[in-house]
Amino acid sequence: MAETIEYKDGLTLSMPVADLDRAIAWYQEVLGFELRYRMDDIGWCEMTSSVTDVTVGLSVVEKPDPGGATPTFGVKDLSAAKASLEAAAVRIDGDIITIENMVSFLTFFDADGNTLMFFQSLNSND
C-alpha cells in the first residue's frame, strides 16, 4: 500500500502569461487580487486571491497556450460579478448558466486567454 500523502493548507494555480506587468494589472484591477511577490529573473509572481490559502501564480512563457484546469471561484452574487467583468470589458463566454437548485456559473477569460469561472451556489446550506 502506498504511503498517505500529508497535505498542508494552500493551493497555487499556475497560469501562463505573455507579459507579467499586464497580467498583474489584470488580476489586480479585474479580480481584486493582491501581488504577494514577484521574481522577474524567472518570470514568476504570485497573486493572493480572496479565497483563504489560494494563490494564482503567473508564469511568463513565450507563447501562452491556455488550457488545462479551470480555476473556478465562488462568489456571493453572480449577476453582480458578471456586471463587474462587463464594466472592465472582460471577454465572457456566453451568459450565466444555471443548474436548478444547485449552481449557477459563468466562464470568462484573462488577458492571455486563460479560462476562469465564477460560481454561485443555489443550495441554501452553502
Image (cartoon, rainbow, N blue to C red):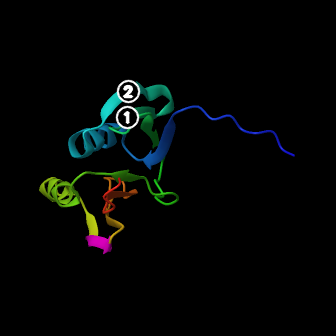
| Amino acid residing under circle 1 | Met
Q: Residues within 10 Å of mark 2 (few under 14, many from 20)?
A: few
Please give the range of residues in magenta.
94-100
Determine the image quadrant of residue 20. Answer: top left
**Tag 1, which secondary structure?**
strand
Q: Does the magenta stretch include residue 95?
A: yes
Q: Which residue is drawn at 16% across and 56% down?
A: 80
Mark identifier at residue 103 = none
Q: Is residue 93 magenta?
A: no
Residue that lies at the very extreme toward the front in this rendered image: 125
Q: Which residue is drawn at 76% across and 39% down?
A: 4
Q: Where is residue 24 in the image (x, y as percent from the top left)?
A: 31, 38
Q: Where is residue 35 in the image (x, y as percent from the top left)?
A: 33, 29
| Amino acid residing under circle 2 | Arg
Q: Which residue is drawn at 47% across and 53% down?
A: 63
Q: Residues within 10 Å of mark 1 (few under 14, many from 20)?
A: many
Residue 16 relative to residue 25: left or right: right
Among numbered discs 1 and 2, the one appearing first in the sequence: 2
Distance (Cα) linking label 1 and label 2? 5 Å
**Tag 2, which secondary structure?**
strand
Determine the image quadrant of residue 92. Answer: bottom left
Q: How many labels does the image show?
A: 2
Which residue is labeled 2 in the image?
36
**Main SS of residues in magenta:** strand
From the viewer's side, name the closer residue of 85 and 23.
Answer: 85
Marks 1/2 in contact by CB < 8 Å: the verdict is yes
Q: Where is residue 15 in the image (x, y as percent from the top left)?
A: 45, 47
Is the residue 33 above or below the residue 96 in the image? Answer: above
Residue 58 relative to residue 24: left or right: right
Which residue is labeled 1 in the image?
47
Determine the image quadrant of residue 81. Answer: bottom left
Is the residue 111 above or below the residue 42 in the image? Answer: below
